[in-house]
Amino acid sequence: MENCLSVQTKPAIATSTASATDREFVKGLGLTSSTMLVMGSMIGSGIFLVSAEISREVGSPALLIGAWLITGFLTITAALSYGELAAMMPHAGGQYVYLREALGPLWGFLYGWTLFLVIQTGTIAAVGVAFGKFLGVFFPSISSSHWILHLWKVPAIHLGSMTLGNMDVGISTQNLMAILMVIALSIINIFGVKTGAFIQNVFTFAKVAGLLGLVLVGIFIGRNAAALAANFGANFWHGVWASHPIQVGAGGPLVLVSTLTILAVAQVGSLFSADAWNNVTFTAGEVINPKRNLPLSLVIGTGVVIALYIACNVIYLNVLPLHGSPDGGTILQRGIQYATEDRVATAALTQMFGAIGGYLMAVAIMVSSVGCNNGLILSGARVYYAMAKDGLFFRRAGKLHPTYKTPVVSLMVQMVWICILCVSGSYGQLLDYVVFAVLVFYILTIAGLFVLRFKHPNAERPYRAFGYPVLPAIYIVMAIFIDIVLLLYKPQFTWPGLIIVLLGIPVYYAWRSRPGLSEASPA
């Protein structure tokens, strides 16, 4: 890192409006809280589930680890690049501000639009329902089929490779738990950023300790001789240099692709599991000494989580064989590929401890879900607040609570939309559609790093991105390759996500044409 200890006279990028609004916030997030926000937002339920799907795609222990190593490289490289942007523009809204300043207000709005409509809110809804699902392990009456108010069932609509609908609308005991969790955490976060940070620190510490415990137990107690022989013998490199079958779209033809292509497809699960690390940038207006603490929290937080994720997958391979059968009668026969409902971590703990392992994992996922959603709720509201200040969101969302200095209206608007998604049952499909779009915005933001270096070469940069320009350029090339592969082979996930983003363009111009909805003109 390049620390600027002397007084700087170089021009800053951020606008005076952003500086003024940031002074309204309470500086309540130190390095520890910021790092916990990074880690807590990243660790949800994905690490406990997605390795099953990845292993079915890659078919090799070496490629399973390779998929997570690629995710780790991409995530940490992006975090290093975002560190420079965060130190330059330490203002509420984070990535929204970076896109606005580098590429223009339309691109910032499209990011904020997609974040509100799907990315942030859909993730919170999905994580909340996962909480309800695992709470049902202890209370069987909490179930997706136990309806309190069943409104209607939306029939399936097939549009080429896409399937829309096929979901139930109403309140079940399962999504009621999600709604209650979202309401509780939204209200808690009204009472000051320090209150939200305390909740975040407690739950993040608990789930990091849980993941670390899984790793240590797997190393010293859970090693299984059959799994070790199956995964780390001659089969470790199985299929690394071979062609891999993949189905194009939903119900499309099977084609053979290269190892690089199949690894790109596998990134859908691993990148999604490692996502949301950028949420700390949304809260920049409340970070103490942000020019130092934001870059540090990004690097430390992503580094620790990625190390834990890779270690967890090594443990899965120590405990369970990768290859298995969907008709297997035992945990070992089903393997990682066909773990029941893809719950790989549950299968690993059950193999080590018996039935008690399933209960331990249910508790771990519930703790992880609360911590993850708290971080997402806390940080997401800051983006809509920044958009409102630019005249691109509801005017009242740009108001802070007079006592606690939190974006109370933004928190409430976010809460209402999440609850609607929970009741509608649409969040799962929406999340499938935005993995592609999320990667597009990461590409654009890191491209913005190059734009700002060119447009504002003399701007104050308390931290300069490590490895610039090589590492950011490699990230852009790799991410573009992944998006192209997804467009070709997973069109049912990519085109709908692109359509959601593009629908924001007419909304942007419509919003700009109605100044009465905002306090300020768009940037």
Image (cartoon, rainbow, N blue to C red):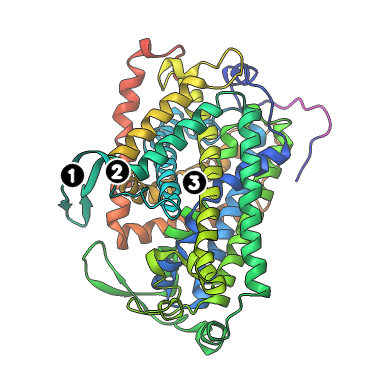
Tell me how far mark 3 sits from mark 1, CA to CA. 33 Å
Label 2: state its secondary structure.
loop
Image location (x, y in percent) of residue 298: 64, 45
Instruction: Give whichever of 253, 227 is nearer the camera.
Output: 227
> Which segment is the magenta one?
5-10
Contact? badges 2 and 1 (CB < 8 Å): yes
Residue 490 vertical position relative to residue 239 in the rendered view, above or below: above
Image location (x, y in percent) of residue 230: 51, 85
Asked if residue 446 lies in the magenta stretch, the reply is: no
Camera-near label (3 vs 1) is: 1
Image location (x, y in percent) of residue 188: 55, 28
Give the residue number, with chain letter if any, for mark 1: 154
Could you tell which of marks 2 and 3 lies nearer the N-terminus?
Answer: 2
Give the residue number, with chain letter if any, for mark 3: 442
Could you tell which of marks 2 and 1 lies nearer the N-terminus?
Answer: 1
Asked if residue 8 lies in the magenta stretch, the reply is: yes
Q: Is residue 400 left or right of residue 436?
A: right
Camera-near label (2 vs 3) is: 2
Give the residue number, with chain letter if any, for mark 2: 425
Instruction: Give whichever of 420, 331 is nearer the camera.
Output: 331
Instruction: Give whichever of 85, 184 is nearer the camera.
Output: 184
Tell me how far mark 2 sits from mark 3, CA to CA. 27 Å
Is residue 205 visible from the viewing direction of this image?
A: yes
- The amino acid type, in three-letter code, at marker 3 is Tyr
Residue 42 vertical position relative to residue 47 in the rendered view, above or below: above
Contact? badges 3 and 1 (CB < 8 Å): no
Q: How many marks?
A: 3
Label 3: state its secondary structure.
helix
